[in-house]
Amino acid sequence: MSAPAERQGTCRIVELPLADGEGPMPASAPWLALRRAGAACYAIGYAMLRATARWARDVYRFIAFPFSHCRGVYPDFRRAESAALPMTRIGFDHAGLAGQYRAELYLGLDNSEYPLLYYLERILTQHSTVLDFGGNIGVHYLRFRNYLVLDKVKWIVCDVPAITRVGRMTCADIPNIEFINDIDELGCAIDVFLASGSLQYVESHDSLLTRLVEPRTRPGHLLLDHLPLYDGQRFVTLQNGGRLLRYPQYVFNREDYLSSIANRGYELVDSWDCRNASCLIPFHRGKAVRAFSGLYFRVVEDRKTT
């Protein structure tokens, strides 16, 4: 005679009632609930740890303010400048800085400059004129001539007076390069407007572009490199230039910037990331620019002739 089912040497699953309509609960359900609760606590703890680490990193960056880093979000240049310490110098027009550029002159190419080299090789002819806006002491010409034939290209560098003075000395033996301090000094039309890491430091940026595309100077090509573009509202921040130098600079809205160029009669040909340049502002994660941008615009022919 066989034993009753409940006395057999097998395990029975005890089913516990749940709320009305949910059916029975296996005996292992409490353990599953504990595991889920533990996982939830771990996730919350991990999120809190990450938030604390981000906060600590922002505190360090804000206080230390390392070289080339940015700090603060401001509506205009004046507010950004007022946030700098009294003993700091604002902007690039300083003889000591210009001398430093010459002493530390580096003629290798940055990664983001290869697109510039690629398009210049295809654009330039022996009779071309290039306006190198913010071209420092002639560094772009000195770099690119190792890869391009530039002997007969008219290369005009526009920069602040302290830097152009040193630039003229540095390039004194190069007859086809000249230095000016304002685009109003241009005496001819230009074929290529080159601006690498310079436009964001111009307080009168919008009026500069308007002056640039006047019929007298209107370039056929715009090569813009190292631009801080992102998807939020335009603002100004303050960059540490080292040795008590501070630079107010714009961070532009990407869509607005592209539209502003297109509305002046240009079409976007290409764009690229400059991953060696970024703008991460402490306590303003939503305004981060993790990689600057490079842009190549070409004039729309029917607009060029009007």
Image: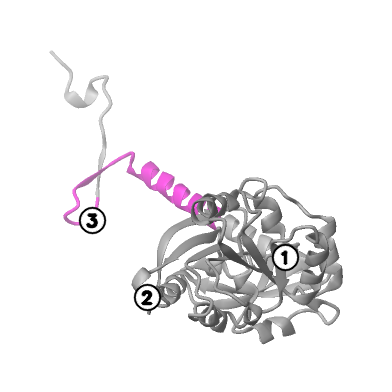
Q: CA distance from mark 3 to mark 1?
A: 76 Å
**Residue 84 against residue 150 in the figure, above or below:** below
Q: What is the quadrant of the N terminus in the image?
A: top left
**Going 44% across and 76% down the picture, which residue do you hit?**
260
Residue bearing mark 2: 303
Residue bearing mark 3: 19
Q: Secondary structure at mark 1?
A: loop
Of marks 2 and 3, the one in the foreground: 2
**Going 37% across and 69% down the picture, which residue do you hit?**
301
Numbered mark located on residue 136 in the image: 1
Task: Check whether the beta carbons of the residues at disc 1 and disc 2 lie within 8 A of each other.
Answer: no
Numbered mark located on residue 24 in the image: none
Q: From the top left corner, tell me how far across and down residue 118 is, in percent.
A: 52, 49
Q: From the top left corner, tell me how far across and down residue 181 is, in percent.
A: 71, 77
Quadrant of the rendered image containing residue 54: bottom right
Around disc 3, counting alpha carbons within 10 Å, would you say few (fewer than 14), some (14 to 19), or many (20 or more)?
few
Q: Amino acid at mark 2?
A: Arg
Of marks 1 and 2, the one in the foreground: 2
Q: Is residue 25 magenta?
A: yes
Looking at this view, is 45 or 246 the one in front? 246
In the displayed structure image, the side of residue 93 where residue 234 appears, left or right: left
Q: Secondary structure at mark 2?
A: helix
Task: Check whether the beta carbons of the residues at disc 2 and disc 3 lie within 8 A of each other.
Answer: no
Number of numbered callouts drawn: 3
Which comes sooner in the sequence, label 2 or label 3?
3
Instruction: Please report the bounds of the magenta region as a residue range.
Output: 18-47
Q: From the top left corner, tell me how far across and down residue 233 is, in percent.
A: 49, 77
Task: Describe the colour scheme in one phrase.
Answer: one colour
Q: Amino acid at mark 1?
A: Asn
Q: Secondary structure at mark 3?
A: loop
**Going 76% across and 67% down the picture, which residue do you hit?**
241
Q: Is residue 226 visible?
A: no
